[in-house]
């Protein structure tokens, strides 16, 4: 067996970034900037009010309560040709431009308008700049908004839209093919024959790929036949940026995947000192990376999290390929007897009022027991021979596919 870190380095050292492309801003969510973006406009583009209220001269409110002459109304998107003079005020709506002469806004709740008299009573004293959003307060021309390597989320896209950016140069979205192998796999609703099982790995991996923001390509099921395997992997390598396969990477007598991939690719077959997901293969068919994941469903998902996800994220332009761990408090016994392996245990998590994580077993820990993986919020790391008891700290790898903590 080889250490986990060695296996990860072997994978990452053999990858290259994908090419950059220019895409419309609407298509850029989840992609990684290939170059920094510099603002050409300021935000806000003009001084405006953050509240509905009255634009005033702050000095006129020093003796509040005071009554001011109301000289007009300014709606959002409108302009005002006049100027607020001494003893005057203009009604103003959120987002509307500040009129000349005014240097503060009194929120409407602290005023009383007498439309018949054309006057407004101001109840409080306000300072200069009260509820005013100054031009360029957020962004100014020449500001570097985001550096290369930034993963574009909703907030990033909103900022870019606010300065008029319509398209961005990004590392293109990876196209990831997923294939299952094995005569025993069934992918329809007919009754199972003796020895058959339904294919869950392909659906799981396709979903993980899609959740990561990449393009998921279903390459189907390949039977245990060298010609069929060769055709499936060759077609996948020609049309995809990476291939995820499950099954055929252990020591079975009918694991033709090994034979074929050694013929058409440059592969390394590994036994890694972890549980689950000990068997793992990685290599290239031409320039296309191939990730050979174990056939057991939990092992396949754990292998994806430890190897495929960070590797494909690197190809997509992300810089951080580390396994990001959090410290939690165990509510169960999670240790194990020495066996030369790090155990990754499926755990459910909860967070207390202080933000501290607590974890407990999510169910059965067998590599075939997918239900526990579905319930899991994280993988808890149990080092070889560790004795982790209730109340002890434990390192956990949060699962990005877990939408919420229970």
Image (tube, rainbow, N blue to C red):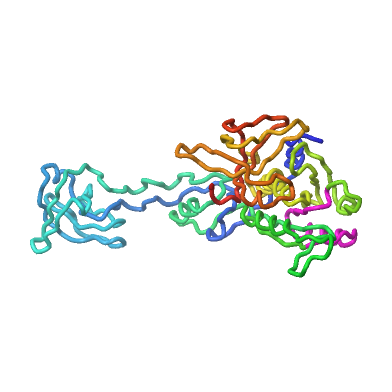
The location of residue 11, given as percent across then percent down, is 75, 42
State whether residue 84 appears in this view.
yes
Q: Nearer the viewer, residue 223 or 233?
A: 223
Q: Is residue 389 above or below residue 138?
A: above
Q: Which residue occupies 21% across, 42% down? A: 127
User: Residue at coordinates 67% horizontally, 47% vertically from top-left?
Assistant: 309
Q: Residue at x 43, y 55 (%)?
A: 162
| Percent x, y of residue 157 | 50, 54
Would residue 47 be found to the left or right of residue 285 on screen?
left
Instruction: Name the foreground residue: 23 vs 100.
Output: 23
Which of 129 and 194 lies nearest the eye of the viewer? 194
Residue 188 quadrant? bottom right
Is residue 148 left or right of 258 when viewed as pictured? left
Q: Position of residue 235 (x, y in %)?
A: 80, 61
Residue 170: x and y in percent read: 60, 52
For residue 112, what is the image quadrant? bottom left
Per the image, is 363 magenta? no
Residue at the spot 73% in from the left edge and 56% down from the top edge: 201
User: In which quadrant is the N terminus drawn?
Assistant: top right
Q: Which residues are magenta?
A: 221-249
Instruction: Please tell me whether residue 233 belongs to the stretch shown in magenta.
Output: yes
Kindly give the residue lying farthest to the bottom in the view shown: 190
Q: Is residue 264 visible?
A: no
Vertical arrangement, residue 323 with respect to residue 298, above or below: above
Left or right, residue 362 beside residue 369: left
């Amino acid at each position: 067996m080889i250490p986990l870190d060695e296996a990860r380095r072997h994978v990452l050292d053999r990858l290259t970034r994908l090419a950059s492309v220019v895409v419309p801003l609407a298509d850029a969510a989840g992609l990684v900037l290939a170059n920094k973006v510099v603002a050409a406009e300021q935000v806000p583009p003009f001084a405006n009010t953050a509240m509905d209220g009255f634009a005033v001269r702050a000095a006129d409110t020093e003796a509040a309560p005071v009554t001011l002459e109301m000289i007009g109304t300014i709606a959002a998107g409108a302009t005002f040709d006049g100027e607020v003079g001494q003893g005057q005020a203009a009604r103003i709506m959120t987002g509307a431009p500040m009129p000349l002469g005014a240097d503060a806004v009194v929120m409407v709740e602290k005023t009383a308008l007498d439309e018949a008299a054309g006057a407004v009573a101001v109840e409080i004293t306000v300072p200069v700049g009260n509820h005013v959003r100054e031009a360029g307060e957020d962004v100014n021309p020449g500001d570097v908004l985001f550096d290369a390597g930034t993963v574009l989320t909703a907030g990033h896209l909103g900022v870019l839209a606010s300065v008029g950016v319509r398209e961005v140069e990004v590392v293109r979205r990876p196209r990831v093919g997923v294939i299952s192998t094995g005569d025993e796999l069934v992918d329809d609703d007919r009754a199972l024959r003796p020895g058959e099982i339904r294919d869950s790995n392909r659906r799981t991996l396709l979903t993980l790929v899609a959740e990561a923001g990449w393009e998921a390509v279903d390459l189907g099921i390949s039977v245990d036949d060298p010609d069929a395997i060769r055709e499936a992997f060759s077609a996948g390598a020609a049309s995809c940026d990476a291939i995820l396969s499950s099954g055929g990477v252990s020591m079975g007598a009918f694991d033709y995947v090994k034979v074929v991939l050694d013929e058409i690719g440059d592969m390394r077959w590994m036994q890694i000192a972890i549980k689950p997901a000990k068997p793992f293969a990685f290599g290239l068919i031409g320039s296309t990376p191939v990730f050979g994941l174990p056939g057991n469903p939990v092992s396949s998902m754990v292998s994806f999290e430890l190897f495929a996800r960070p590797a494909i994220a690197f190809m997509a332009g992300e810089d951080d390929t580390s396994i990001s761990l959090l410290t939690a408090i165990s509510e169960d016994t999670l240790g194990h007897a020495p066996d030369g392996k790090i155990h990754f245990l499926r755990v459910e998590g909860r967070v207390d009022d202080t933000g501290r994580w607590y974890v407990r077993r999510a169910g059965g820990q067998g590599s075939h027991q997918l239900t526990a993986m579905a319930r899991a919020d994280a993988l808890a790391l149990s080092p070889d021979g560790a004795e982790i008891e209730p109340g002890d700290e434990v390192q956990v790898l949060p699962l990005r596919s877990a939408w919420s903590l229970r």
